[in-house]
Image (cartoon, rainbow, N blue to C red):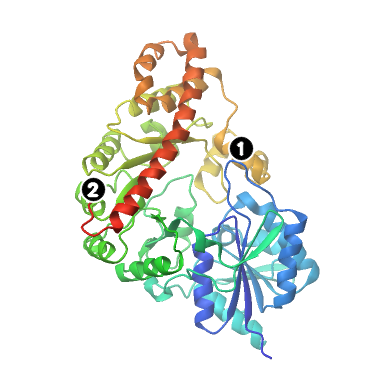
Amino acid sequence: MERRQVILVAFYNKKALGVRYLEAALEGVGYQVTTIFYKDFNSVRPRPSTRREAEMFLQVVREKQPVLVGLSVMSSMYLDTVYQLMDGLVREQIAPLVCGGAYATMFPEKLLERGADFVLRSDGERAICWLADALRLGSDWRSIPSLCWREEGEIRQNEIGDLLSDVNGYGIPVVNSAGACFIDHDAIVWGDPQRNTRSYEVIASRGCPFTCSYCCCVNLRRLLPQGIPGVRTWSVNSVIDELREARRHCKKIVFVHFYDEIFPNLPGWVDEFAEKYEKYIHLPFTIWSHPKMVELEMLKKLKRVGLTEVIMGIQSGSERVRREVFHRYETQEDILRAISAIQEAGVFWGSFDLMLQHPFETIEDLKESYRLVQKFPGRYELQLHGLNFLPGTDIVHMAIQQGYYTPAELDRIMYAPMEEQFGAYWKREVSQESQLWYEMIYCWQFACFRSRLRRWESCPESHAREIHGAYRQAERLARLRYIWKKGNVVFRRIVMERPGRRT
């Protein structure tokens, strides 16, 4: 019997949209796909893969005898887990091993040297189908666009190609993966873990128009062939079709999270989206935006049909850090205008990210972040975290050029075990003065601390004990606020389901 079985693997992501697009493409040309969702995501207490889990994975591969095994390698943060599975596959030689994803696109040689048979760069929907056919039929695969492989001790790379300018041609991702399983906690559970989700993740666009130095999106965009736009947007009909599928298969959905780098704001797109979202979906939803992309009228239209939260990266209150280090060119006025627009539109919640306590930042930069946060109007949430150096980002070269790290030191940081990398994301070894300003920034989001903070800010070191105590209280308040915030979303979900609903 002809083998038409393919195995795809998603790491630390039960939603894994990229893998679900590949599954849809392969099923569209007649393949049976088993998608393995390997490990769940936990940024606070990440769990490395165990030997038992790796053996469970290999057992599935042995039983299915696929044409190929495709690993989605999106990030360097879980490479230890990827390599554990790769080593097992290379050792047993069960099926050709193919890697794709953002990290694989930027560093195909690293995965090929580790034992991968092939790497597919950039969009993989068409290339993986060509490769599966070639492997199944025993035909030549060397001309497949975007394909990389090792031959005679050398790395061969075909030009990235066969990408669609109109991403609607890729269709919609598989919402309920029929042959899926989930491996975690030394157990395997058959069935798509997404079916029980309370939040459905969707992307309406692929790519980002900005050039942030800490993000790989700009360098992925630079690899696109001429004529392929840096940002490609799905039609409203495609987005709504996917969400209608999600509502059919995922009965517990409470809200929708649009995972675009920046939510689309094309002429006419938002108007059509608002009309059809209200008609067919009517669930609370969250979007990501940018200070230069926030528009009051757009937010008003989205709020009327369910927008409950805007998540926006600010990253630093220092214009110097934003411009010279992060390559972000919005002004203080742009940020405050965007936050005011979120408030004026009546959006229930605003969440704003700040990346603090990194080598490029001075105490004066931290103070500028504090002074900017003091001007934020209304109710909001601050997400404070550190800076992770990720392979393939411009900020890595900046850190080396400016003498903060040697290449070897950065390699140790970027390729450290997952627990160390996530630990560095949340906690830094910093001076007491830096930590005090960090804690004051965090506390400012809670109005109950502001009068005291004003007294302490002239000399934080003299009030260190009080500031540390307020910070611990603020963390407890944040946990309570999270529960209240989620309860509010559930309430809105119930209200939106009622006839004659108001949001």
Q: Residue at x 74, y 60 (%)?
A: 54
Q: Around disc 1, counting alpha carbons within 10 Å, would you say few (fewer than 14), some (14 to 19), or many (20 or more)?
A: some
Q: Residue at x 71, y 72 (%)?
A: 61
Q: Is residue 154 left or right of residue 175?
A: right
- Picture quarter with the N terminus: bottom right
**x and y percent of residue 9 in the render?**
62, 65
At label 1, which amino acid type do we have?
Gly
Which residue is tagged 2? Answer: 295
Classify 197 as above or below 323: below
Q: Quadrant of residue 64?
A: bottom right
- Number of marks in the rendered image: 2
Q: Residue at x 24, y 43 (%)?
A: 346
| Residue sticking out furthest to the bottom | 1
| Residue sticking out furthest to the top | 462
At label 2, which amino acid type do we have?
Glu
Tell me the SS state at disc 1. Answer: helix
Classify 170 as above or below 469: below
Which residue is tagged 1? Answer: 423
- What's the distance in space between the residues labelled 1 and 2, CA to CA? 36 Å
